[in-house]
Amino acid sequence: MIDQIIEFNKQFVASKAYEQYVTDKYPSKKLAVLTCMDTRLTELLPAALGLKNGDAKIIKNAGGLVISPFDSAMRSLVVAIYELGVEEIMVVAHSNCGACHMSFDHFHHEMNARGVTDDTLDTISKCGVDLNHWLEGFKDPEASVRNTVTTIKTHPLIPADVTVRGFIIDSITGALAEIS
Ligand code: ZN
Protein backbone atom coordinates (compact mmCIF):
# COMPACT_ATOMS: atom_id res chain seq x y z
CA MET A 1 0.00 0.00 0.00
CA ILE A 2 2.77 2.45 0.85
CA ASP A 3 4.37 1.90 -2.55
CA GLN A 4 1.03 2.77 -4.21
CA ILE A 5 0.87 5.92 -2.11
CA ILE A 6 4.36 6.92 -3.21
CA GLU A 7 3.32 6.49 -6.84
CA PHE A 8 0.16 8.55 -6.28
CA ASN A 9 2.24 11.25 -4.61
CA LYS A 10 4.44 11.69 -7.67
CA GLN A 11 1.35 12.32 -9.81
CA PHE A 12 -0.10 14.67 -7.18
CA VAL A 13 2.97 16.88 -7.18
CA ALA A 14 3.55 16.68 -10.93
CA SER A 15 -0.01 17.83 -11.67
CA LYS A 16 0.28 20.67 -9.14
CA ALA A 17 -2.80 19.38 -7.30
CA TYR A 18 -1.29 20.96 -4.17
CA GLU A 19 -2.01 24.49 -5.34
CA GLN A 20 -5.50 24.59 -3.84
CA TYR A 21 -4.08 23.70 -0.39
CA VAL A 22 -1.37 26.33 -0.08
CA THR A 23 -1.59 28.26 3.21
CA ASP A 24 0.69 29.14 6.15
CA LYS A 25 1.26 27.53 9.55
CA TYR A 26 -1.03 29.87 11.50
CA PRO A 27 -4.62 28.62 11.94
CA SER A 28 -6.84 31.30 10.40
CA LYS A 29 -9.72 30.50 12.79
CA LYS A 30 -7.34 30.57 15.83
CA LEU A 31 -8.82 27.16 16.68
CA ALA A 32 -7.45 23.80 17.81
CA VAL A 33 -9.50 20.59 17.66
CA LEU A 34 -8.50 17.60 19.78
CA THR A 35 -10.20 14.55 18.34
CA CYS A 36 -9.96 10.83 17.62
CA MET A 37 -7.84 9.18 14.93
CA ASP A 38 -10.94 7.24 13.78
CA THR A 39 -10.95 6.91 9.98
CA ARG A 40 -14.68 7.79 9.82
CA LEU A 41 -13.69 11.31 10.87
CA THR A 42 -10.84 11.85 8.40
CA GLU A 43 -12.94 13.90 5.99
CA LEU A 44 -16.26 14.00 7.88
CA LEU A 45 -15.04 16.08 10.83
CA PRO A 46 -13.53 18.98 8.86
CA ALA A 47 -16.49 18.94 6.45
CA ALA A 48 -19.07 18.93 9.27
CA LEU A 49 -17.25 21.73 11.12
CA GLY A 50 -16.70 23.80 7.98
CA LEU A 51 -12.92 23.61 8.34
CA LYS A 52 -10.61 23.98 5.38
CA ASN A 53 -6.87 23.62 5.02
CA GLY A 54 -5.23 26.33 7.13
CA ASP A 55 -8.25 26.91 9.42
CA ALA A 56 -7.41 24.90 12.55
CA LYS A 57 -4.80 22.78 14.28
CA ILE A 58 -6.27 19.26 14.39
CA ILE A 59 -4.66 17.03 17.01
CA LYS A 60 -5.54 13.36 16.88
CA ASN A 61 -5.02 10.31 19.03
CA ALA A 62 -6.92 7.17 20.02
CA GLY A 63 -10.06 8.52 21.66
CA GLY A 64 -9.27 12.24 21.37
CA LEU A 65 -8.09 12.33 24.97
CA VAL A 66 -5.63 13.99 27.25
CA ILE A 67 -4.58 11.03 29.43
CA SER A 68 -2.04 12.87 31.56
CA PRO A 69 -1.26 16.58 32.03
CA PHE A 70 2.06 16.41 30.15
CA ASP A 71 1.22 13.94 27.38
CA SER A 72 1.64 14.53 23.66
CA ALA A 73 -1.87 15.96 23.18
CA MET A 74 -1.31 18.53 25.93
CA ARG A 75 2.10 19.44 24.47
CA SER A 76 0.52 20.04 21.06
CA LEU A 77 -2.14 22.30 22.62
CA VAL A 78 0.49 24.34 24.46
CA VAL A 79 2.43 24.78 21.19
CA ALA A 80 -0.80 25.67 19.35
CA ILE A 81 -1.55 28.43 21.87
CA TYR A 82 1.88 29.98 22.40
CA GLU A 83 3.45 29.46 18.99
CA LEU A 84 0.50 29.48 16.64
CA GLY A 85 -2.03 31.86 18.17
CA VAL A 86 -4.82 29.45 19.08
CA GLU A 87 -7.51 31.06 21.25
CA GLU A 88 -10.24 28.39 21.28
CA ILE A 89 -10.06 24.61 21.76
CA MET A 90 -12.71 22.05 20.84
CA VAL A 91 -12.45 18.55 22.34
CA VAL A 92 -14.43 16.33 19.95
CA ALA A 93 -15.10 12.70 20.84
CA HIS A 94 -17.40 10.68 18.57
CA SER A 95 -20.15 8.08 18.68
CA ASN A 96 -19.16 4.39 18.64
CA CYS A 97 -15.51 5.19 19.30
CA GLY A 98 -13.22 2.18 19.15
CA ALA A 99 -11.32 3.45 22.19
CA CYS A 100 -14.48 3.23 24.29
CA HIS A 101 -14.29 -0.44 25.18
CA MET A 102 -10.55 -1.04 25.15
CA SER A 103 -9.10 -3.08 27.99
CA PHE A 104 -5.57 -4.04 28.81
CA ASP A 105 -6.61 -7.69 29.13
CA HIS A 106 -7.37 -7.70 25.40
CA PHE A 107 -4.06 -6.00 24.52
CA HIS A 108 -2.19 -8.36 26.81
CA HIS A 109 -3.57 -11.40 24.98
CA GLU A 110 -2.89 -9.92 21.54
CA MET A 111 0.61 -8.78 22.47
CA ASN A 112 1.51 -12.24 23.78
CA ALA A 113 0.19 -13.74 20.52
CA ARG A 114 2.42 -11.32 18.52
CA GLY A 115 5.56 -12.23 20.45
CA VAL A 116 5.63 -9.68 23.27
CA THR A 117 6.50 -11.63 26.40
CA ASP A 118 5.24 -11.08 29.95
CA ASP A 119 8.88 -10.41 30.90
CA THR A 120 8.82 -7.40 28.59
CA LEU A 121 5.52 -6.22 30.06
CA ASP A 122 6.91 -6.65 33.59
CA THR A 123 10.02 -4.64 32.66
CA ILE A 124 7.85 -1.81 31.31
CA SER A 125 5.76 -1.83 34.49
CA LYS A 126 8.92 -1.72 36.61
CA CYS A 127 9.98 1.40 34.67
CA GLY A 128 6.90 3.09 36.10
CA VAL A 129 4.49 2.77 33.15
CA ASP A 130 0.99 1.77 34.23
CA LEU A 131 -0.07 -0.13 31.10
CA ASN A 132 -3.57 -0.66 32.48
CA HIS A 133 -4.09 3.09 32.60
CA TRP A 134 -2.18 3.80 29.39
CA LEU A 135 -4.31 1.43 27.32
CA GLU A 136 -7.63 1.49 29.13
CA GLY A 137 -10.74 2.64 27.32
CA PHE A 138 -13.32 5.04 28.65
CA LYS A 139 -16.64 3.49 29.57
CA ASP A 140 -18.56 6.78 29.52
CA PRO A 141 -17.78 9.03 26.51
CA GLU A 142 -19.43 12.13 28.04
CA ALA A 143 -17.51 11.77 31.31
CA SER A 144 -14.33 11.25 29.29
CA VAL A 145 -14.88 14.47 27.31
CA ARG A 146 -15.61 16.38 30.54
CA ASN A 147 -12.45 14.98 32.08
CA THR A 148 -10.29 16.04 29.14
CA VAL A 149 -11.90 19.52 29.03
CA THR A 150 -11.27 19.95 32.76
CA THR A 151 -7.66 18.78 32.46
CA ILE A 152 -7.02 21.36 29.72
CA LYS A 153 -8.95 24.20 31.43
CA THR A 154 -7.23 23.73 34.78
CA HIS A 155 -3.77 23.06 33.35
CA PRO A 156 -1.15 25.37 34.86
CA LEU A 157 0.26 26.23 31.42
CA ILE A 158 -3.08 27.04 29.75
CA PRO A 159 -3.96 30.76 29.91
CA ALA A 160 -7.33 31.52 31.55
CA ASP A 161 -8.55 33.41 28.47
CA VAL A 162 -8.41 30.31 26.24
CA THR A 163 -11.89 28.89 25.57
CA VAL A 164 -12.20 25.09 25.95
CA ARG A 165 -15.46 23.30 25.02
CA GLY A 166 -16.32 19.61 24.72
CA PHE A 167 -18.44 17.82 22.11
CA ILE A 168 -19.42 14.41 20.78
CA ILE A 169 -19.79 14.22 17.00
CA ASP A 170 -22.06 11.65 15.36
CA SER A 171 -19.76 9.36 13.33
CA ILE A 172 -22.35 9.11 10.53
CA THR A 173 -24.22 12.43 10.32
CA GLY A 174 -21.50 14.70 11.70
CA ALA A 175 -23.98 16.27 14.14
CA LEU A 176 -22.26 17.94 17.09
CA ALA A 177 -23.63 17.65 20.62
CA GLU A 178 -22.03 19.91 23.22
CA ILE A 179 -21.10 18.33 26.54
CA SER A 180 -21.68 20.88 29.28
ZN1 ZN B 1 -12.55 7.02 18.25
Image (cartoon, rainbow, N blue to C red):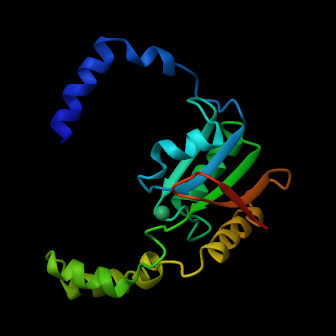
Q: Is residue 113 left or right of residue 179?
A: left
The residue furthest right is 161
Tell me the quarter of the image containing the C terminus.
bottom right
- Between 95 and 108, the residue placed more toward the observer is 95
Residue 155 percent coordinates (x, y): 73, 64
Number of numbered labels in the structure image: 0
> Is 135 left or right of 89, judged from the image as shown?
left
In the rendered image, residue 153, in percent from the top left (x then y), is placed at 76, 63
Q: Nearer the viewer, residue 157 or 138?
A: 138
- Residue 123 seen in render: no
The N terminus, quarter of image: top left
- Residue at image position (74%, 69%) is 150
Q: Can you name the residue that lies furthest to the top here?
A: 15
- Quarter of image, res 126: bottom left
Residue 153 in the image: above or below residue 59? below
Q: Measured along the vertical axis of the image, is residue 149 above or below residue 159? A: below
Residue closer to the observer: 106 or 157: 106
In the image, residue 86 sits, relative to residue 10, either above or below, namely below
Q: Residue at x 38, y 81 (%)?
A: 127
Image coords of residue 56 (percent x, y): 63, 38
Regarding residue 127, the answer to whether it shows in the image is: yes
**Quadrant position of residue 51:** top right
| Residue drawn at (69%, 29%) of the image | 28
* Residue situated furthest front in the rendering: 173
Residue appearing at x 48%, y 81% in the figure:
133
Is 157 positioned to the left or the right of 124 in the image?
Answer: right
Residue 87, placed above or below residue 140: above
Image coordinates for residue 142, horizontal then vertical, percent: 66, 73
